[in-house]
Image (tube, helix red, strand yellow):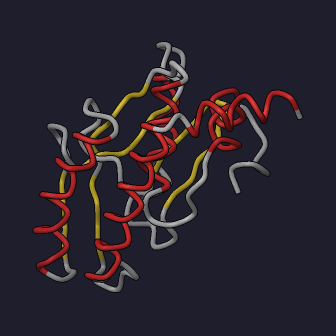
Amino acid sequence: GMLEAQGKYRLFMDADNSVPVEYFTQFLPYFSQGYDVVIASLEVPGAQVHERGGWYRRFLGHYSKYLIRALTVWEIHDTQRGFKVFSEKAAQDIFPLQMLTGWGFDFEVLMLAKKLGYKIKELPVVWNNAGESKVNAKAYLTTLADLFHVKKNMIFGKYGRYEQQQRKT
């Protein structure tokens, strides 16, 4: 979807509206402050969480964030929130390099944004989980596999080779 999107700013968000689309207008001023990517976060001061899902979500989510940070983008406290806005240029540069299509694509595109020198802003949001999410315990294992896949790609320079290949085409 981000490869087909048009416009000066490109938003992707969870279909369940757990972070309301109204945040979009609150995120826009940060682009005029020099940010290229603005993301929702539950891990910065001011965020509120209304969780009605399984207990394992908060438990596994809390600890998995540290592992994700350690292996990809330490500066970002919450890579997995499904509400991210990209400038047109950032989206055009980042998303063609994306290799994952599973849950791990969030930290992959943020790692790519950092690698490409884009400035990322993490903002607090109110997050309402209705408890009907498609994220189950198995999704955490899948995301862990994605994390190791991204780290392996980083170590072996696959994003760099992919980036060079994309420039040639």
Q: Residue furthest top?
A: 33
Give 16 or 88, whichever is nearer the viewer: 88
Q: Position of residue 85 (x, y in %)?
A: 53, 40
Q: Position of residue 47 (x, y in %)?
A: 20, 47
Residue 9 falls left or right of residue 104: right
Which residue is pictured at 60% across the width and 53% down the height? Answer: 99
Q: Is residue 49 above or below residue 120?
A: below
Residue 161 falls left or right of residue 19: right
Give 11 or 139, whichever is nearer the viewer: 139
Q: Position of residue 15 (x, y in %)?
A: 52, 70
Residue 58 falls left or right of residue 34: left
Which residue is pictured at 49% across the width and 24% down the height? Answer: 29
- Please count the marks in the image: 0
The quarter holding residue 45 reads: top left
Quarter of the image with the C terminus is top right
Which residue is pictured at 68% across the width and 38% down the height? Answer: 162
Quarter of the image with the N terminus is bottom right
Residue 60 falls left or right of residue 110: left
Give 75 or 23, whichever is nearer the viewer: 75
Q: Is residue 109 above or below residue 55?
A: above
Q: Position of residue 14 (x, y in %)?
A: 48, 65
Q: Residue furthest front?
A: 156
Give 138 or 131, whichever is nearer the viewer: 138
The quarter holding residue 158 reads: top right
Which residue is pictured at 54% across the width and 15% down the height? Answer: 32
